[in-house]
Amino acid sequence: MKWSIVLLLPGAIAVAAEVPFERIRDAANDPGSWLTYSGTYSGQRYSPLAQINAANVSGLRPVWMYQLQKAGVFESSPIVADGVMYIVEPPTTVTALDLRSGRRLWSWTAKLPKDVKAIGFPQTNRGVAILDDKVFVATLDAHLVALDAKTGVKRWDVTVADNTTGHAMTLAPLAIDGRIIVGISGAEAGVRGFVDAYAADTGKQLWRFWTVPGPGEPGSETWQGESWVTGGGSTWLTGSYDPELKLLYWGIGNPAPDWNGDLRQGDNLYTCSLVALDPETGKRRWHFQFTPHDTHDWDANQIPILVDAAISGRMRKLVVSPNRNAFYYVLDRVTGEFLAGKAFAKQTWAKGLDVQGRPMVLPDTEPSEKGTLVWPSLQGAVNWYSPSYSPLTGWVYAAVREMGAYYYKTDADYVPGTPFLGGGEQALKGDQAWGAVRALEATTGEIKWEFPLHSPPWAGTMTTAGGLVFGGCNEGNFFALNQRSGKLLWEFQTGGPIRANPISFLIDGRQCVAIAGTHALFVFGLEGVPLQREFTSLRQ
Amino acid sequence: MQGLGGVGPSLARPVLTQAPDLASLLAVIDDGIRGTGMPSTWMLPKKDRRAIAGFVRTLGVAAEAPVAGDPARGRELFAKAACALCHTVDGQGGVKGPDLSEVGNRRGAARMRRMLTEPGAEMSANADGYAEFLPVRLTTIDGRVVEGLRVNEDGFTIQLRDLENRIHSFRKSEVNEVAKGFVQSIMPVFGSMFSATELDDVIAYLTTLRGKK
């Protein structure tokens, strides 16, 4: 047989669209896969799989583990499609694993500069996006790279921003119809934030939305003098998408400098806000600011959760979010109208929210030279890790950080590529701080139950149609709770802090759950359901 | 500000244990010391961190600040008060309390005085801020009471070491109540047994404990 003839046959090299946009849009009908950062575009981190449930979850056992090839901060949320799991090992190594065996299929490592800058956060990465025949990764030195999903071969590589000035990327990109949407990190270095769109097939930039408006643009009146140039507003987590409304929802981070707001008087739009963007043009449809003129580093980058629910007897399209500032918010996602809000954790900085959802800030809560004790700490009542939502209960499940901090204010001089902070914090920790998984009624924020955690967590939650909510904690326990009661049903000691979000998928028809641990990815399944392993040998 | 030590050790010494030269001192100031209470100061501008390093270096230029008291007499008092029943020095002694072999590297004189006069007031904490040697009284669901020092804890389990040095591990589902003795060190108040001079002597002795070279 002449191999060359086979390979040259027309059509044999046709590009296969394994994960087209339509499949991601309808991901809820494809529960065996996990096709976006949060599972679907809605940001709910809900698996429709129900094989594992309250009655049998106590039988959950490890199926396989994958150990990191190099130590680092492992925060990757995997993508699962067509028998392959895609993870990102820190700082930026994309690895494809055979879903059945956990064996590596390929790895691709970004060539990072030796002095790569990650100012104010660990050198980590939170995952890839998949679309058609490619996976997409945002690198620590702020490149967006497309890789062939089958081999890891690089298809294109574009520079999103200059890393020497502190621009960096750790987020999982969002893949929608023909375009890849990304945000940027670097507010602690005084970058001016943005959301970008790139053509999925070529890497050509399609648009940029600046999160800090320039002179003359709407919102520019909320910045003093030239402060907008180094105004922060980074966009370091993945947004959500409503394909029917054709709107992107993206959370925006803190203004810069973080703790000294003296030279940026005003609300500092669109920092600490949620924006709704037109995916075709990048034009802003609406915005809602959670923390005007923030001086506590309370980024609003948390994953927006898109939920349809009745409010006062009327079905509404909502976007809801437990925010880093300790308040839970319910917004109309068509208009951005504030509908409800309520504190879900200890906070000492605001009397509450007014009818517009604006915080009524208490006096003497600003950072100061001698330190001001405020709850929550700068890491917030929640942070980057994901919340989840269950349509079974109508509740949001948030891993909550109960921690205060002394906030300090200092001068801030902008030097490109160095920390631009204007202060710092000393957090209360150890026996003075704690955590909890809390169930919040999605339309009101009312706390339905809480499951206490030993320390303020860094792991997200995932809900399943089996009536479970999975979570993790700093002490290494990966656990499953009853969605309705908060009762502990199962836990496994992974041997190191968990800083990641769980996912669920099928291996040969069998439901599994995966979580990134400190130095290894763990996959769990039910005992007694044998895997249909295929043992084939090419050497007969 | 003389750098004589608070929670941490005196910095008024010619050679610092963790930072014998400028490069290692800058690294300690930038990154903190893993596994200890020494935090990173990445939030400060680089020029400020350099300035701190410069200041710390000046502290060590003069001869080490003397601690009042006679270390030789302190050593005798340490033996007489049977401190070694609970504390190890250079491999000899008990394990109910912390190993003091290098306490002179870790603690300043003021903190040592406080530990001797008000043992529970400022409990030592690990790098995550959890109290070490925390007295715990635990009641199991079948009514058994176990007392000891907390070794480790998570949301689901707790590990204790009792005063006979036995390790106990409980799942919290097996436990009715965990009473934690914050500000209740099991160490006696030696400060009230020693005279003021004797207290100085003991502190002077402890300050000399810098580990075997």
Image (cartoon, coloured by chain):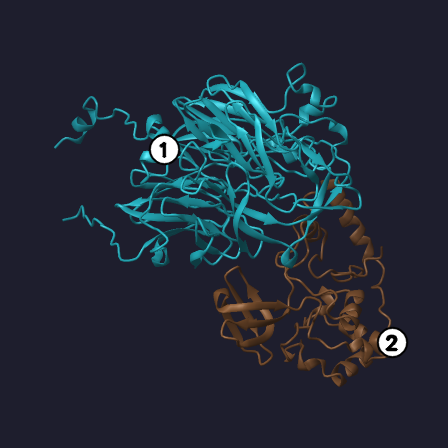
Judge by depth and name the residue closer to the eye, A205 or A480: A480
Residue B129 location, x and y as percent? 65, 58
Residue at image point 47% right, 52% down: A486
> Helix, strand, or loop for circle 2?
helix
Pointer 2: what residue?
A: B196
Residue B28 against residue A19 in the figure, above or below: below
Residue A290 location, x and y as percent? 62, 32
Please report, as a chain letter, where disc 2 is located. Answer: B
Query: What is the residue that sits farthest to the top in this orientation?
Result: A216
> Helix, strand, or loop for circle 1?
loop
| Quadrant in which the N terminus of chain A appears | top left
| Colour of chain B in the image | brown
**Badge 1 vs badge 2, beta-carbon distance below 8 Å:** no
Residue at image point 26% right, 54% down: A529
Pointer 1: what residue?
A: A153
Residue A62 location, x and y as percent? 36, 56
Residue B22 location, x and y as percent? 72, 51
| Colour of chain A in the image | cyan
